[in-house]
Image: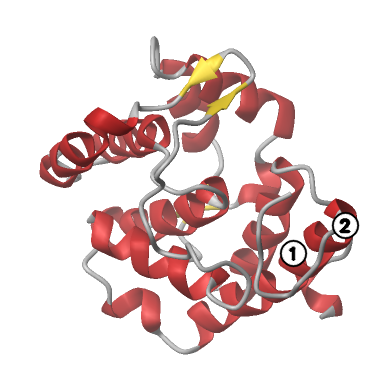
Amino acid sequence: MLKNKLGIDNFAELARQEEKISKKKALALFENGMLDRLETGRFSALRAIHKYLFEDIYDFAGEIRTVNIAKGNFRFAPLMYLDAALAQIDKMPQSNFDEIIEKYVEMNIAHPFREGNGRSMRIWLDAILKAEIGKVIDWSKVDKEEYLMAMERSPVKDIEIKYILKAALTDEIDSREVYIKGIDHSYYYEGYTAFKTEEL
């Protein structure tokens, strides 16, 4: 259980409230134009996204994690290298699709926050794609298992995740429907299945 501002000590209830609150905030990000005002592709933009999504739930929203974390057998960037890794990611080029996905893969390895990395990073990724190549990902076209397996293998070989995400590109960059589907599928990838954004 993560300490939270809601005073919830039940994991299932925390997950439900986290999904409900952060989905509303994610939709507001799109509607208030905040994403278009962030410095695309920088860690500062990802930090702002994370803070906005989770500031009503966790004290650590937008704060770099202070613990080492792992998922399954994969350990994300150790704390002692995290600041250097984030500085290096900021310097990575992002002028074409391949460069953008390589940057996304490196940010996933860094995993800078205690919780909510995947959801924040997918919004961050789409903001880069929109600004740099005039595309976004229609996440409803991305199979969950294929995506998770490809991301797990991406630190060694990123060709698979590039193939999966490239096949789901759309030029509907200002579509509220595409964005909402992306929010819903982000929670599906993370194991949340409570309700769709349209129901909020």
* Residue at image point 14% right, 37% down: 88
Image position of 138 with respect to 70: above or below: below
User: Residue 91 in the image: x percent, y percent?
Assistant: 10, 43
User: What residue type is disc 1 on?
Assistant: Glu
Q: Which residue is mark 1?
A: 19
Which quadrant of the view contains residue 182? bottom right
* Residue at image point 38% right, 82% down: 34
- Give left or right: position of 114 versus 57: left
**Is residue 66 among what the camera can see?**
yes
Q: Which residue is mark 2?
A: 10
- Give left or right: position of 33 versus 139: left
Indicate the secondary structure of the residue bearing disc 1. helix
User: Residue 49 in the image: x percent, y percent?
Assistant: 42, 67
Using the image as rendered, state which of residue 5 and residue 104 is in the foreground. 5
* Residue at image point 79% right, 57% down: 15
Which quadrant of the view contains residue 197? bottom right
Colour logic: secondary structure
User: What residue type is disc 2 on?
Assistant: Asn
**Is residue 134 among what the camera can see?**
no
User: Residue 138 in the image: x percent, y percent?
Assistant: 59, 52
